[in-house]
Image (cartoon, grey):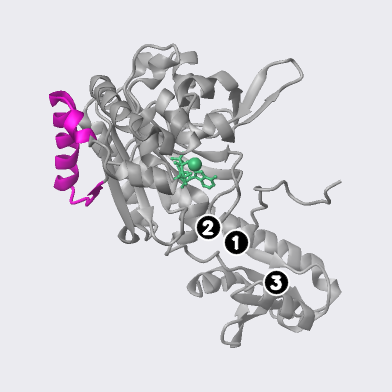
Amino acid sequence: MAGLQPVRGTRDILPDERWRHRFIEETALGVAARYGYSEIATPIFEFSDVFKRTLGDTSDIVTKEMYTFTDKGGDEVTLRPEGTAGVARMLISGGLAQDLPLKYFYRGPMFRYERPQKGRFRQFHQTGVELLGVAEPLGDIEVIALGAEILEGLGILSKSTLELNTLGNAESRSAYREELIKYFNDFRAELSEDSQDRLERNPLRILDSKNKRDREIVANAPEFADSLDTESTEFFAAVTEGLDALSISYQLNSRLVRGLDYYCHTAFEFTTEGLGAQGTVLAGGRYDGLVEQMGGTATAGVGWAAGIERLAMLAQNVPGVERSIAIIPVVPELQNKAISLAHDLRSRGFTIELGYRGNMSRRLKRANKLNAKASIILGPDELERGAATVRNLDTGNQEEVSLETLADHLKQHN
Ligand code: ATP
Ligand code: MG
């Protein structure tokens, strides 16, 4: 046995980090709720077809990264590598398309068989939004603005760049595809093996190849802008004008094509410098063809997903964990007095720690280690007088406080 280690690429999330994750999730949910988005949760695994049919045969996710297995009933299922396909499946199987537009927020674990490195895991977590049934550029503007506001709330926006591109409508994409095939054909033998394969199946994907020689060849490839038809050009202009109106700055990046096949029109990524090669924190785009490709009625869609681990590494303003108050009975006979006082104060909303054993000095040490802000020392003499000693653990100051006014006293010390 490989020893009791977590599986490569998976991690235990201990309290400090989980606290950061929760702050990120709650910040994201709070902003999304103000835009009218509601939280949903889809299953962590789906029939493999849900992903295979939608992410495309040539995407890295489908070709290399999926956790797929056959269950005991013989069904082939996959741990979800991303959230959008499951949401689209839900729209179809739940018959939700009557109620468009729909605005969803989600968070949860995703699974990809990747080479683990900083900011890249095999089980990681995403939060994301999907706006379904809005074909207008207003949808793209809204989800980008929503993403930007979340990054702002986390103190990350000023350190990130919004990269923006358009993949046009289907006609523009197939015109561009032809241009690319013509161009790359001349370099066929020099392209990486992956890109030769992409040339057959999805030449657009060559544009985001990380191979050095591929990149040199890509540098002189035809520009998408030259293949965009009027509809696509106008759509993109409306998106950029909306962003301008909101003073959201962006950089046009004509090589931004995103890994998945179902995107059209707007593609965007918020990237940062802080995380090395794993610099993309929030990424998304428009996927009008997805629901239809899955077998549902054609439904416009636009959304994004953000990596919670990456956001957690960058977030600036995560508040500290709420500090507790420790109740310390100085003699064992006061144990029950201590637990009932703890019960009473907890029911009033205080965070109370109660040592399980040890004399007063050990318990005080432990309270300090837990970063408690104060301790309530219960001694027989003070209790006789209906009081207890409250010690401020930061300053060491202490005073006797009547039990009747204890809660008010502690509130002032918050
Ligand atoms: P990358 O280029 O880093 O592989 P991607 O294009 O595969 O990213 P998306 O599928 O767009 O990523 O997922 C959205 C976000 O989810 C990413 O921007 C990133 O923050 C996060 N993410 C993706 N894969 C991982 C992973 N293996 N570990 C941690 N976070 C991830
Ligand atoms: Mg990836």
The reply to whether the residue tagged 3 has its Cβ within 8 angstroms of ligand 1 is no
Depth order, front residue of 375/168? 168
- Name the residue beneath numbered marker 1: 16
Q: Residues within 10 Å of mark 3 (few under 14, many from 20)?
A: many
Q: Position of residue 385 (x, y in %)?
A: 69, 80
Quadrant of res 157: bottom left
Q: Nearer the viewer, mark 2 or mark 3?
A: 2
Say whether disc 1 or disc 3 marks the residue closer to the N-terminus.
1
Query: Which amino acid does the dot numbered 3 rest on?
Result: Ile
Secondary structure at numbered mark 1: helix
Depth order, front residue of 295/91? 295
Q: Which mark is residue 327?
A: 3
Say whether disc 2 or disc 3 marks the residue closer to the N-terminus.
2
- Name the dominant secondary structure of the magenta segment: helix
- Name the residue beneath numbered marker 2: 20
Q: Which mark is residue 176?
A: none
Secondary structure at numbered mark 3: strand
Q: Is residue 144 placed above or below 3 in the rendered structure?
A: above
Q: CA distance from mark 1 to mark 3?
A: 23 Å
Magenta-tinted stretch:
224-252
Q: CA distance from mark 2 to mark 1?
A: 7 Å
Q: Are the residues tagged 2 and 1 within 8 Å (C-beta)?
A: yes
Q: CA distance from mark 2 to mark 3?
A: 27 Å
Q: Nearer the viewer, mark 1 or mark 3?
A: 1
Query: Which amino acid does the dot numbered 2 rest on?
Result: Arg
Q: Is residue 15 placed above or below 282 in the rendered structure?
A: below
Residue 348 is at least partly visible in this image: no
Q: Are the residues tagged 2 and 3 within 8 Å (C-beta)?
A: no
Q: Residues within 10 Å of mark 1 (few under 14, many from 20)?
A: few
The reply to whether the residue tagged 1 has its Cβ within 8 angstroms of ligand 1 is no
